[in-house]
Amino acid sequence: MTNTTNLFATVLASCLLAAATTSLRADSPLERVTFTDKSTDDELTIEGRILFEGANGGVLLEDRSLELWSVTSDHLRSRETLQQHFRPFDGDQLGEYLQSQLGDQFSIVESEHYVLCTSADQAYAEWVGRLFERLQHAFLDMWQRAGLELHTPAAPLPAIVFATRAEYQQFATQDAGPQLADAAGYYSIRRNRIVLYDLTSDSDAAAANSVSEVNRRMRASPDNVATIVHEATHQIAFNCGMHTRYADNPMWLLEGMAMYCETPDLRSASGWKSIGKLNLRRLNRFRRFAESRRSGDSLLTLITSEDRFRDPELAADAYAESWALTYYLIRDRREQLITYLQSLASKQPLRRDNADTRAAEFTAAFGDLDKLETDFLRYIRRAGRR
């Protein structure tokens, strides 16, 4: 996932929407907005709906592909309210839109809830689409059974799948920054799309020519399967009502939720089958970290700040602790976690909470932090030994 903290800060500073008001009704009017792009100085005209409008005239615009555009008043050139209501692209329209951006060498592969624009072999794109569909079904089913009211995404979800790592790296560097060029994929909160490449192309073998051959190759690289599931979980969670884009979403929760889903299943023909299997890689990392972990302070800093995620020396332990905390809360404090998730989902975009507010919201849902830490550590020590 692209860096949500830096992205949030950039949008917040540029939009200056301190007095923003929301416009999320189903009958939102379609508007045509012309503005100067801050990064290129090009003049753009985008049709979409205004999500927020600042007192100074800046706007947050969502286009029909569900990409977000922040426009400050000094870059805004014109606004026109059209005679239609806002409607996201359907599958055919989204496919045409993505293809127009990427070129005719890309083809479109559609599944029930996804549109994949791909330069990779069709068999690989179909395999990815099937994995996305299984994940979305399992994710929604799990949480709806638990009592959390989520919904199927209102529009098809976009993904770009490149044929080679080199193609992916060139695109990722321009689209999301060089820090993601060496990853196996990412989800962009602003653009609301997943970007991947054919992970079977890292070998010297020819491209897989069937879904079954992709399955066979991917079973040999479970970490790659985990990466795809991780990023796809982010996209689902931001489009089903669990998270709100550009709201103050704690990093530990976003990443913990994705890691809870990512565990590969090597016994499955497809490499992944269900949500919530014990993530031994994250568990073992947390157990090593726990030997030097500072009780109380560690949990508090995880909940209230993203600093540890941004520090290369601390990030791996922060991710492991996020997985461990999420695993514990889902398994042992599920009703309280649902209350907490509902509270976060109701937050408005472009509102940044301070550390005290985050801590207060967490303890309001889960109670005394010291007691929770004791219960949490005891539970994780026993994980995998039951």
Image (cartoon, rainbow, N blue to C red):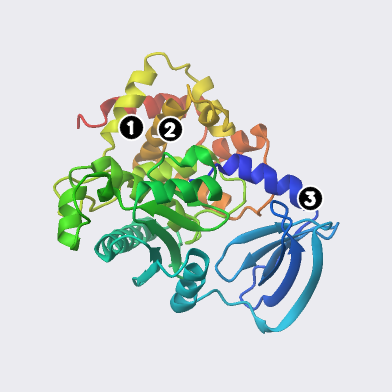
Image quadrant holding the C terminus, namely top left
At 55% from the left edge and 68% from the top edge, which residue is drawn?
65
- The image's mark for residue 282 is 1
Marker disc for residue 138: none
Q: How many marks?
A: 3
Q: Which residue is mark 3?
A: 16
Q: Position of residue 297 (x, y in %)?
A: 53, 20
| Amino acid type assigned to the residue bearing label 2 in the image | Tyr
Q: Is 218 above or below relative to 54?
A: above
Residue 128 lies left or right of residue 166; in this view the side is left
Q: Residue at x 50, y 23 (%)?
A: 298
Residue 201 place in picture, x, y as percent: 27, 49
Whether residue 171 sits left or right of residue 217 in the image: it is: right
Local packing at callout 3 (Cα closer than 10 Å; few below 14, some 14-19, many 20+) is many
The residue lying toward the viewer, choosing from 351 and 116, is 116
Which element type, helix, strand or loop, lies under badge 1? helix
Q: What is the spatial separation of the Cα atoms under label 3 and label 1, in whole angstroms?
A: 39 Å
Occupied quadrant, residue 236: bottom left
**Pointer 1: residues within 10 angstroms few (<14), some, or many (20+)?**
many
- Mark 2 and mark 3 lie on one chain; the one further toward the N terminus is 3
The residue under label 1 is which amino acid type? Arg
Nearer-the-camera pick, 26 or 89: 89
Between disc 3 and disc 1, whose residue precedes? 3
For the residue labelled by badge 2, is the local secondary structure a helix, a strand or a loop? helix
Looking at the image, the residue that sits furthest to the top is 292
The mark lying in front, picked from 3 and 1, is: 3
Q: Tell me residue 27's x, y (percent).
A: 64, 78
The label number, if any, that marks residue 319 in the structure image: 2
